[in-house]
Amino acid sequence: MILEARKDQVHRKGDEAFALACNKDSLAGAVSQRACVFCGSRVVLYPIADALHLVHGPVGCAAYTWDIRGALSSGPELHRLSFSTDLQEVDVIFGGEGKLEAALRELIDRHAPKAAFVYSTCIVGIIGDDLEAVCKRVEAEKGIPVIPVQSEGFKGNKRAGYNAACSAMMRLVGTGDTAGISPLSVNILGDFNLAGEIWIIRGYFERMGVEVVANVTGDGRVDDLRRAHGAALNVVQCSGSTMDLARMMQEKYGTPFLRVSYFGVEDMAESLYDVARFFADRDPGMLDRTRELVREELAVLYPKLQEYRKALTGKRAAIYVGGAFKAFSLVKAFRLLGMDVVMVGSQTGTAEDYRELYEITDEGTIIVDDANPLELAEFVREKDVDILVGGVKERPIAHKLGVGFCDHNHERKEALEGFVGMLNFADEAYRTVMSPVWRFVPRRAEASHG
Amino acid sequence: MAETDQSPADRSPITDHRSRISYVSTTNACKLCKPLGACLVFRGIEGAIPYLHGSQGCATYMRRYIISHFREPMDIASSSLGEKQAVYGGGPSLKQGLRNVIAKYRPALIGVATTCLTETIGDDVPGILAEFREEAAGETLPALVRVSTPSYSGTHAEGFHAAVRAVAEQLGEAGEPTGAVNLFPGSVSPADLRHLKELLRDFGLDGVILPDLSETLDGPALQDYEELPRGGTPVARLRGMGRSRATLEFGRALPGTTAGAVLARRFGVPLRSLGLPVGLRESDRFFRALEELSGRATPREHALERGRLVDAYVDGHKVVSGVQAVVYGEEDLVVGLAAFLAEIGVRPVLCASGGRSGRLAGAVQAVTEGLLPEPPAVREGADFYELAEEAEALGPQLLVGNSKGYHLARRWQIPLVRVGFPIHDRFGGQRLLHLGYRGAQSLYDRIVNALLEVKQEGSAVGYGYL
Ligand code: SF4
Ligand code: SF4
């Protein structure tokens, strides 16, 4: 079932020395679960709620990304609309710059956004519209930043899109006034505020005495981004999406960064401790406050988790997510529930990511890069999995095979971050794994009849 | 020559003359892109896999979109073109992709649709496929059907019809008559298709349906994961389309030359064009066609369904009478829904679609003729922004269309009765029935109940009897 050309992107731990090919272009005809560069940049920038997000291209690219995620805003909701230039044949033949310029004017007048992001799609790369020039003209005319996002779908994979998004944001960073920002301050990078998760994390920081300058990008605001360079520290979640921005800010403004994860008890607590340790010499009391915070949260969490653990111990989990960093936390989270992770993979992992996954997983675990439905189905079957964690495209694979499912991608509407998120996750795992419906699916029904 | 139930006047494009501001930008499109429609069609063929010749993103997005509605696996292969291929041409990737798909899926048919990218770089797909066939001389290859689907001209509905036509053109063969009836139902739900199959069976007709998604996008729980889901119309039967006795084709706003017209011209298969059988009158036309084709009267079971439907119309008429509705979606569906709403006494005040066939206004007028105090406003090429702007002034009490209108229903606090594709915010979109008497019954019940609920919720008393 695995195509010859993909063999080096699948590893069974214990077979041989670990080496996994990754960050390759998807194989033609392999039905990759991956999207494109545009998707990568759209994913990252979309939650900036007071900006205009205009997709320059034919209708599909914009239509498919219309409000598909649960990125919540505490104020403006401009990000939830889908704007497109809906290029027509004449534009393709004669160029779409005129249409783009007119569309930008029209939309900026209509919505008065704080900034505009203009995404280029495949076709724009081919017809060669000069996005940069159009954006510059409109910017001068309208007096707001109008930023081109070079995200032609074919120019690499999703990771390249992350990079394009970060470059676009970097144009805003450093343009605002940093007066009044506390020395105990951070930017939250790489969180999209799905189901309001950023509010949970901000709550923790508040209790620790840390000011959050910019949310990047969930519940994001243009003005916050402009003054983000005033923060003392960047806290970067999810290795893929905003790492580039953290690196750029370090280079240009000397802002240090920490890699964190808000999934699972261990990683959540460790992330907060890391931040507290970072500020230890500026605020010696912070570490104690953080310990107190964790203690309080765990006191609520643990008894409930034990109940779930009782039921779930020994069940088998498979993980296939977009970014590999999330997979680390999920491996640990499943362990906390007493479950065994038997397969783990991602769409965009790097060599270090996979090396780390290899280190933390058990013998026999399948590690896979850029998988497709047939492979995933095969692994789920081979490992007799009880739950698959993935996104909408993976759901039918699990369900067809009579296996539980947890949506851990951008479209989920349940908060899974933070201590309370761990509880939600455990609850979701419990409800799907322990559901009686699996008794009736053909695969299980036969097993129970012997 | 094509027979038709519609007078020539029905077919002539009548455009709307009311003045409107025309916007350059699109906000919340009321349409999707062409290849998506083609993928749905290919999924309705037994053992077929849709293949997009383009970059990876398009295929992934469409899969996601379709899966969210049907909650079924939907594999769409892609050439996964990168920068190099975009510059030097995607031919080698297409061939390699086909090889990989054949190795993994062993399909009976691969439906190759182009995307904006490959259309723009000018890849000659027929030429590449011919080369591919040549290079594979001696091997048994799956059937290869190609369709050109650049989204900068047209919508997913047009991509859908283009793919149906491509299959008819590229597979249809002359020869011994089969006695079968071709049915091109358009983009309807698996539940609708199951109902259509039942009807053909009950009239003793042997139907060749394209596409038949009744199982492939609404399948059972399985022992094992199937590479390609079971069901769909077999390729051999599709080859026989040129030898069928007649073609039935649904849609009053079909763009350009249709599959049915192709089969009529090439093989002399008589074509009967009908509107989508939504509601009593459009269904009556369909049943009449079935009676004529089969030489049988409508079976009692179905006649009874009709009777019950009329009875229900009477019982519920006061709940729906005079209610103002906004209808949107694919053009043919909008026409069908307008016909249905008008006959039950609801006033469709605005009919809108992202498509621009030029036929919507005329078709809506034809099916609502004499039933409405005044003809509804009709908007072609509309997005949800324009739709909202226009509808706001009309003060609708009901929305009928796909899930994408939910934000309007929420804003205006009126019910949305979900019909069509996509339905992303409710369960069971693939099992919604809206064709035939039975479909009309289910639509009618849903509409009446939606309005009763509004009344009940809005009442201070909390009536237990309504
Ligand atoms: S490029 Fe064209 S085919 Fe691809 S998603 Fe965009 S509109 Fe659709
Ligand atoms: S056209 Fe390009 S940018 Fe748009 S979805 Fe397809 S691959 Fe992505």
Image: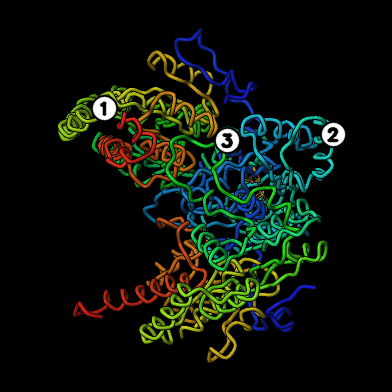
Whole-percent x, y for residue B247 in the image: 70, 66
Which SS class for mark 3?
A: helix
When asked about the image quadrant of residue B417, the answer is: bottom left
Q: Nearer the viewer, residue A47 or B345?
A: B345
Q: Pointer 1: residues within 10 angstroms few (<14), some, or many (20+)? A: many
The residue indicated by pointer 3 is: A158
The residue indicated by pointer 1 is: A337
Q: Nearer the viewer, residue B114 or A176?
A: B114
When asked about the image quadrant of residue B358, the answer is: bottom right
Residue farthest along the top direction in this orientation? A17
Mark in the foreground, 3 or 2:
2
Q: Pointer 3: residues within 10 angstroms few (<14), some, or many (20+)? A: many
Q: Is mark 3 within 8 Å of ligand 2?
A: no
Tell me the kind of residue under disc 1.
Leu
Q: Is residue A41 visible?
A: no
Q: Residue at x 69, y 80 (%)?
A: B6
Tell me the kind of residue under disc 3.
Lys
The residue indicated by pointer 2 is: B134
Label 1, label 2: how far apart the Cα atoms are: 57 Å
Label 3, label 2: how far apart the Cα atoms are: 36 Å
Q: Is residue B355 visible?
A: yes
Horizontal side of A109 relative to B319 (left or right) equals right
Mark in the foreground, 1 or 2:
2
Q: Quadrant of ligand 2?
A: top right
